[in-house]
Image: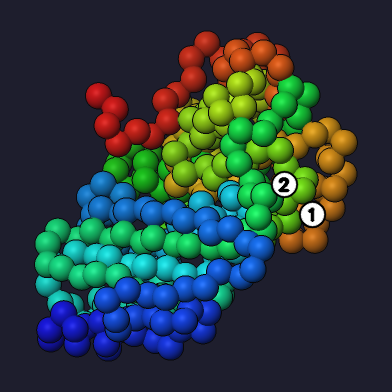
Amino acid sequence: MTEFELIERYFRRPARNAVLGVGDDAALIAPSPGFEIAASVDMLVEGRHFFPGTDAEALGHKTLAVNLSDLAAMGATPRWALLAFALPSVDEGWLAAFARGFFALADAHGVDLVGGDTTRGPRNLCVTVLGEVPAGRALRRSGARGGDSIWVSGKLGDAALAIAHQSGRIRLEGADLVDCENALARPAPRVALGLGLRGIASAVIDVSDGLVGDLGHVLDASQIGATIDLDLLPRSSALERQLGGAAREIALQCLLAGGDDYELCFAAPRARDAAIVTLGDRLGLPLTRIGIATAQHAGLEVRDATGRPLERLPHAFDHFAP
């Protein structure tokens, strides 16, 4: 199968929201009047971001999901995607499964695949996604203020717990293993939450590299500090069990800085607390108030059950950390 036959068979589909999609030298897109374009790009490299042998359909889902999570953090509606990948060989079964996972999520969010590139090489998947947000209403990292409530969606740490299991650092069994592996393989981008937070949140970020690091980016961009309570951080029963056992330190790292959560962490004025609870109820999505922003730019403090600050915070994921 040639490169162009591969594209035609698995990735060329009619574009619903584009002037011109796959098949030309470039796509043509027309943003809605009064809207700005939000754009994000993410790369997933085999052996670095996912294990060799990862289920292809789940990988198709995740390849797009991590990008949609970025648009969710901006309060943008996803519209178009570009997919570039390197593959070691043409495996038609793998391609069919990958495309099935990718397009199932794309269809769920009304996203058109409008272009991309293919080449031979070590498995590497790269998506650029573009969305629309009303002019001047994009959510940013830089708007939080002292006194704002700090919130997070969903649960934290399960994906990192699955990685810890797969790398042999802990052992998960039964439903705990199934739930954690699903959290790693099929993250749910919080697009509807991002849209609902427009006009409510003062600052938003998606939790991709771990809560400590990602919330730290909001604090730096907003020039504030924050105090959060460890006991308030939402986690699964699987992670709670690990916190209570011999693997507590590993579980704590997963909870605070494990990454791969793709939840939204956001700040909002205290006066909007009730509106946020109502939004979570409407979406059927747990939203947890985990702390408060402080006016001084003094970094992040995490308090334990006794109210004492943790002496050391784990480091968030960094591709180039020593």
Residue plotted at (61% across, 21% down): 223
- Of labels 2 and 1, earlier in sequence is 1
Q: Nearer the viewer, mark 2 or mark 1?
A: 1
Query: Residue 178: x and y, percent?
Result: 47, 59
Q: Is residue 80 left or right of residue 282?
A: left
Residue plotted at (26% across, 47% down): 48
User: Could you tell me if the residues under marks 2 and 1 are in contact, i.e. CB atoms within 8 Å?
Assistant: yes
Residue farthest along the front direction in this orientation: 33
Tell me the quarter of the image containing the N terminus.
Answer: bottom left
Query: Residue 297: x and y, percent?
Result: 61, 15
The three-letter amino acid code for the residue at tag 2 is Leu
Residue 182 visible in this rendered orientation of the protein: no
Q: Which mark is residue 287?
A: 2
Query: Residue 259: x and y, percent?
Result: 45, 41
Disc 2 is placed on an element classified as strand
Residue closest to the eye, 132 or 296: 132
- State which quadrant residue 58 falls in: bottom left
Q: Is residue 43 left or right of residue 110?
A: left
Residue plotted at (60% across, 46% down): 264
Residue position for label 1: 279
Q: Is residue 115 left or right of residue 133?
A: left
Q: Is residue 28 left or right of residue 290?
A: left
